[in-house]
Amino acid sequence: MARHPRCSQRHEFVLSSIALALALGCAGGGSGTGACALQPFPSGNYVGAKTDNAVNVRVSKAGLDFINADPNWKLLLDTFAPGQKMTLPISCMANSGFKIADQGGPGCTDENCGLMDGVCCPNASAAGCNASIVDSPANVVVNFTGFHLAAIAPDQVQATVDLTIDTGSIYVDSEDRSYAACLWLSPLKCSVHFASGPPVGANPADNLVQATVKFTIDTKWDKLLAFEVLDPLVGVGVCGASGVPAPPSCLDPDDIALNGENNCGFYCDIANIGFVKNLLLELISPVLEGQVKAAIAGQSCRACGSGLPPCPQLAGASSTCDSSSKTCLDND
C-alpha cells in the first residue's frame, strides 16, 4: 500500500530511529514483514480488495528478528541518522534571569563575539544584536547504540532505542551584569555539560527511549495504512519528575557537570544552581520528543518532486506537492 499522503507541516528533522518502526516494518526484502510499501508500486496503485481493519496488517516475529539483528538495524538507521548519530540544536533563551545556551558564534571565546554576553541574538537584526554577536545553537549529540522492535497486539509496534546524549558545554550567564552573588562586580557565568554515563554521567551508561506506534486505516485515502506515535514517550522525561520512570528511562540531573566560567564562577559549584540542571534537561526533553514525533510524521507522507510519481488524487480527496518539505499535503 502507498504512503499516506497527509503530512504534518512542521519542519522535518531526520533524527530518530524510532521512525524505523514504520519504515522497516514495511521493508519486505525477504525479512518476513507484511506486504506494504512506503512508495507506490511501479505498476500503479493496487485496485483490489482492501481491509478496513489495521489489525489485519501483520508483522511477523521473523521479520522483527531480522530488523533487530546487528548490523541490520544499523544499516537501516543510517538512512535517518548517518553513522547512528543525530544532532539536536538548543537555541539561546532566557529563563529566571539567566540566558541559557548563550554560545556566541563559532569558535567564540569572549563577550565580544557573543559568548555569555547576557543577550540572546538569533540573528543580526534582533533587538540589541549585530552580526558579530549572533549566537549559534548549542548542538546536543545523540548516538544510537541499540534498537529493538516488538509487536503489541492488536495494532501497535513498540520501538526501544538505546542512546547516549552529550550536550558539550552549554553556557549560562546572568542577565544582571552586576550579579549580587558576585558582589555586584560581574555577571555569573557557568557552563553545564550533560553526558550519559562516564566520564561525566553516572551509571547506567545509556539512556533508553521507548515509543509506541499505532496503525490505523484511513478510509478517506482509499484505505491506506496510517500511523501515529502514542503519548507519552518513555525515556524523555526528567528523572524525579512525577510519573517519570527510573534511570535509564529518564534524563538524570546527576549526569550533569556544572562549572564556573569567570572569577565569580565558583558560585556555580557552591550554590550548585540546580534549577539550571533541571532546566537544561527540560529543554532537551521536548526537543527530543518533538523530533521523534516529527520524524514519524514525516514517514507518514508520500515523497514528491522530480522523478517521483505525482501526488495522489481520489474522488473526494486531493493532495499537492509541497516544495519545501518535498511531501504530498492533503488539500482539505
Image (cartoon, grey):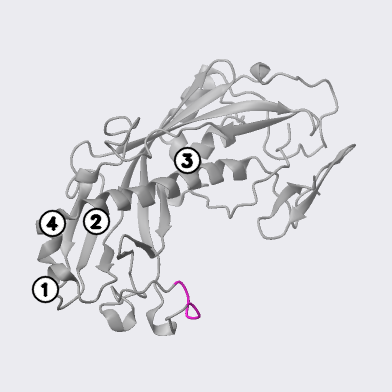
Labels 2, 3: front one: 2
Q: Which mark is residue 193?
A: 2
Quadrant that contains the C terminus: top right
Left or right of 9, for residue 234: left
Q: Kindly identify the amino acid type of the residue bearing the numbered disc 1.
A: Leu
Q: Residue furthest right?
A: 315
Left or right of 215, for residue 119: left
Q: Which residue is mark 1?
A: 183
Q: Of marks 3 and 4, which one's residue comes earlier in the chain?
A: 3
Q: Which residue is mark 4?
A: 271
| Front residue of this view, candidates 202 and 172 | 172
Q: Of marks 3 and 1, which one's residue comes earlier in the chain?
A: 3
| Front residue of this view, candidates 129 and 82 | 129
* Residue 299 covered by magenta stretch: no
Q: For mark 4, give the secondary structure.
A: helix
Indicate whether 121 appears above or below 143.
below
The rendered magenta stretch, by its main secondary structure, is classed as loop
